[in-house]
Amino acid sequence: MTDKTILVVGTFDTKDDELSYMAERIRSQGGSVLTMDVSVLGEPTKPCDISKHDVAASADSSIQEAIDSGDENTAMQIMARGASRKTAALYNDKQIDGVIILGGTMGTDLALDVCQALPLGVPKYVVSTVSFSPLIPAERLSPDIQMILWAGGLYGLNSVCKSSLSQAAGAVLGAARSVEMPSTRKPVVGMTSLGSSCLSYMKLIKPELESRGYEVAIFHATGMGGMAYEKIASQGGFVCVMDFALPELGNLLAGSVVNAGKDRMYNAGKAGIPQLVAPGCLDLIDFAGWQDIPEQYSDRPFHAHNRLIKSSALNNDERRETAREIGKRLADSKAPVHVLLPTEGIEEWDKPGEPAHDPEGLAAFNDEMRKAINPPVVLTEIKAHINDQAFADSALEIFDAWVADGTVAKA
């Protein structure tokens, strides 16, 4: 088995035992280790491969400057900036194959930045006392981050925390050995959608794009999927996007935690990626099953989709607000944007006879979209439902034209 090197990151002044234990577990399985100290005040029991002074220098700063700031948040942000730059440089120099980071809230804050600095496919494991916590917003997460709860180990080693630490050590080494990195052999089209009982256009479009030589990555637009989509778009990971499911935007405006962050619908445009956009499922509003419904929505019925998510519908004013927000977020794109407006419906449950059928609400949304989308963004109305073949055909026609004129790279 090919040996892999894992970077072990943490505050070695206070968590030396735990970090050294993980390093030992990696080595016991045949892996190699580099250690990085991100502490500020204290010293590890033995020198690390990358010292805290190396880390601070990578942030164009120094440990003394971090100390002199007199503020632990400022100091840790210096270390986070340095650790991120240093980790990226180590990976680019082919010195590491994965990273594992240990911490409480301070260490986790730093860990999230470090993971963001590494490309998709590089194993990133965070062992944290706040793993999966609502303290961590979607936009701080890298698309393939892995988190393990550091249970029972805030101060010192014991059999409870060793269970988490040893699993994490084995997981990051195993991931480094088995990962298949994203391929660049085929250009990738990014698409957003929901389950096929609600949105099914991907069944029509995906095989057509694949027959043209493209790979299609479809993201589940329930918060984390949109977050991953946005992150990859920000890194220029797509030759084109088909952003056809936008409930995360409506949820964001409504104050729901089922959102993909404040930068939803911005990153593809900033990265110069051509965008095909449609308002799939933008009539619905979703809240987490555990989330209290805000007062302004308490008078409307909610359906429990399952124990994790509950849904209702946006009213006419809210639909108009989402239309205006779409126009605002697309206006500054550095690449062509073409909005498709399926005037007969935007999700399976808004068809006649279905529970979300609301012709008045759909008409209000369509009316506002006509006002909100302005050149150079192009708006094309399609007298069809978003799940109809006519919608898929229109999307493919625009895509093919972009390929023909060089807007989208040929496969």
Image (cartoon, rainbow, N blue to C red):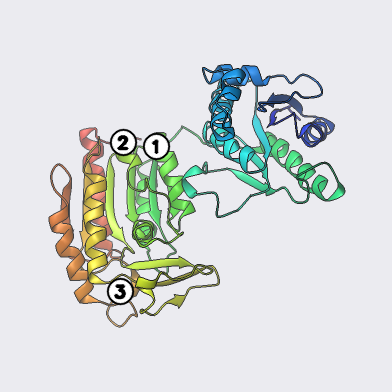
User: In the rendering, at what x and y percent does residue 42 appear?
Assistant: 73, 25
Q: Which residue occupies the extreme bottom position in the image?
A: 353
Residue 243 higher or lower than 70, as above or below? below
Label drawn at residue 350: 3
Instruction: Name which of mark 1 and mark 3 comes first in the sequence.
Output: 1
Residue under circle 1? 234
Mark 2 to mark 3 CA distance (whole Å)? 33 Å
Q: Nearer the viewer, mark 1 or mark 3?
A: 1
Quadrant location of the C terminus in the rendered image: top left
Q: Amino acid at mark 1?
A: Ser
Residue 181 seen in render: no
Q: Nearer the viewer, mark 2 or mark 3?
A: 2
Q: Amino acid at mark 3?
A: Asp
**Considering depth in this image, is 335 or 189 the residue closer to the camera?**
335
User: In the rendering, at what x and y percent does residue 71 appear?
Assistant: 56, 32
User: In the rendering, at what x and y percent does residue 77 appear?
Assistant: 54, 31
Residue 380 seen in render: yes
Q: Residue 404 falls in which quadrant of the image?
A: top left
Instruction: Name which of mark 2 and mark 1 comes first in the sequence.
Output: 1
User: In the rendering, at what x and y percent does residue 268 appear?
Assistant: 33, 40
Q: Amino acid at mark 2?
A: Lys
Residue 284 higher or lower than 101, as above or below? below
Q: Residue at x 18, y 64 (%)?
A: 366
Q: Which residue occupies the extreme right position in the image?
A: 159
Label drawn at residue 270: 2
Q: Residue at x 25, y 52 (%)?
A: 326
